[in-house]
Amino acid sequence: YAEQKRLLQNDYNAVQRKLSEKISSQEAKLKKCKSKQRDMHKEREMIEKEKQELVQVANQLEEQRREIGTKGNRMEADLEASKLKIQEDKADVRAREIKLAKETKALAEEREKQLNTIKEIEKKREQLDEDLKEFERYRSESEKLMETK
């Protein structure tokens, strides 16, 4: 009995270690995922700031266009070129926003998978604990029966 108990305890301890390692690994991945989400959030804020700056530049350019109305076609051409540049920049910002949204969604899905894996591992750990308790009860009852005989 003692040998069986020792072997079972060793198996139980090995499974516990593996589960702990797996949980630690999943937690590290989750931490990495959260870090990446923070970085993406910062980039999103930077994009929003750039967007606001672009709007401000566009407003300034529009005001300048009114002021120079009679200064000639050359300045009008420069202004139009600036507007085109702003439109290109806006399109670039929008493309970056779309990319960030996709990455955010992918990170959220990965995070959900990791959380589910951790939950499964915790359920398995609970089952092992219950199995061990049941085994201990069975062993205890067996010892009592042996003593009565």
Image: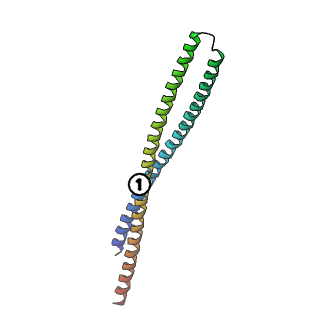
Q: Mark 1 points at which residue?
A: 22
Q: Which residue is drawn at 45% across and 48% down?
A: 108
The x, y position of residue 73, in whole percent, is: 57, 10
Secondary structure of the residue carrying tag 1 is: helix
Q: Quadrant of the C terminus?
A: bottom left
Above or below 42: residue 20: below
Left or right for 37, reference 71: left
The x, y position of residue 64, in whole percent, is: 64, 19
Above or below 80: residue 49: below
Image quadrant assignment for residue 103 = top left
Above or below 54: residue 78: above
Q: Which residue is drawn at 47% across and 45% down?
A: 33
Name the kind of residue labelled 1 in the image: Lys
Q: Which residue is drawn at 47% across and 43% down?
A: 104
Classed neighbour count for the residue bearing mark 1: other residues with Cα under 10 Å, few (<14), some (14–19), many (≥20): some
Above or below 70: residue 37: below
The x, y position of residue 44, in whole percent, is: 54, 37
Tally the numbered discs: 1
Q: Nearer the viewer, residue 22 or 118?
A: 118
Q: Which residue is drawn at 33% across and 72% down?
A: 4
Q: In which quarter of the image is the N terminus?
A: bottom left
Image quadrant assignment for residue 10 = bottom left
Q: Nearer the viewer, residue 142 or 1?
A: 142
The x, y position of residue 123, in whole percent, is: 41, 64
Outermost residue toward the bottom in this view: 148
Left or right for 49, reference 101: right
Q: Which of 1 and 56 is in front in this view?
A: 56
